[in-house]
Amino acid sequence: MRNFIACLLLLGLLAGLSACGADDSYLSVRTHVEPSMPATETPQQEEPPTAGNRSELRGAMLSFVRNWTEQGEIRISGYSGDLTADLTETVRYITQEDPIGAYAVDYADAELRGDAQTGTVEVSIVFRRSAAEIDAIVTVSGVNGAHAKIRQALANFDAALTLRIRSYEDADFSGYIRTYCLEHPDSAMALPEVSAAVYPETGETRILELHFTYSQPRDTLRSMQAAVNTILDSAAAYVESGTTPRRCAELLARFLLTRFTYTTAEETPDMPAYDLLSSGRAHSLSFASVFYAECTRAGLACRLVSGTRGGETHWWNLLQLEETWYAVDLMRSVEQGGDSLDLLDPAALRDEGYDWDAEAYPSNPAPEPEEPTEP
């Protein structure tokens, strides 16, 4: 028993010596701290707007429209005026006269709870447009500002464009879109189907809603556009060898007339330049569009003309050379087997069954004004 106790004392002594010799850099003493929960902030609800007169009431209702608020509340504080009449007028205004309201709101209702001094107005709005559609509205000034945004949308093959136009003037936007596409096949080579609507029907500021429908997906159209631009660039380089305007026009006509053994397209193409330059499908609209675009690149005065030939819709060009205007119809040249520039007397065209609006397309047209571009 005595020996067993001695062994225990010896083991305890050895354990103590071992602990004293340990490297205390391996020792760590920490105070245990319970992890704190992250502080949570109580979300602050936005105070409802307050209205004390007709102007403030209208401003509050318009803010609901702009922010796509379907259910809203307006606090009334010492209202001056006939609140009941003002509510009726304001609902009418935001649904019929305000441009964004006329565009986006299908129905609105406002009901007074309490009195005109300390009551509240509960507002209900039914939208026919989404919040994203309202956010997508672009504000521009005048027709020229609208045209600039339309050109950007056409170049990007966008499906829709909604503009808030200040200083609004009545204009044929669908006609402008068609003409621009025909005159600029390098940037807007496809003719989309266009639907246009204006909200409201009157007013200095209005919403123009445009929808574009293309026959091909955007990526396909971009590939086609790249192919067309390659050929248009080749034609421009070919024409640059001309030393005079007449020689430039002759080279351009030869380039286009000899590019393919053309087949005649029966239907009006929605991609005139691509059908002509990449597929060899000839149509008077295609020839007139491409000839106009290349003449413009070469600095030649040229016009697109639409009319009829033999009672059928037909397109051709007016070209100015040495201060004289000539008619040029490359489709006619293809049909007759020609491969060179044929300058025609506009008056003599009538003998061949051509007909056109002489006021819209005079034999000696004035220079076209350049449209300003938005910065």
Image (spheres, rainbow, N blue to C red):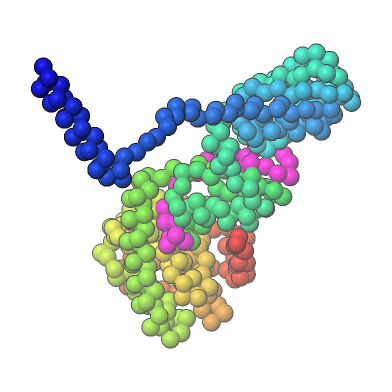
- For the point 74% across and 28% down, which residue is it? 49
Residue 364 position in % (x across, y down) = 59, 71
- For the point 33% across and 55% down, which residue is it? 223
Residue occupying the far top of the picture? 114
Q: Is residue 196 magenta?
A: yes
Residue 320 position in % (x across, y down) = 53, 75
Count of numbered marks: 0
Q: Does the magenta stretch include residue 215?
A: no
Task: Look at the image and give the residue range highlighted in magenta.
Answer: 184-209
Q: Answer with left or right where residue 214 lies relative to residue 320.
A: left
Q: In this view, does 26 lie above or below 312?
A: above
Q: In this view, does 214 lie above or below 338?
A: above
Q: In which quarter of the image is residue 210?
A: top right
Residue occupying the far bottom of the picture? 243
Nearer to us in this view, 239 or 99: 99
- For the point 27% across and 65% down, which residue is it? 260
Residue 7 position in % (x across, y down) = 13, 26
Nearer to us in this view, 46 or 91: 46
Q: Answer with left or right where residue 164 lies relative to residue 311.
A: right
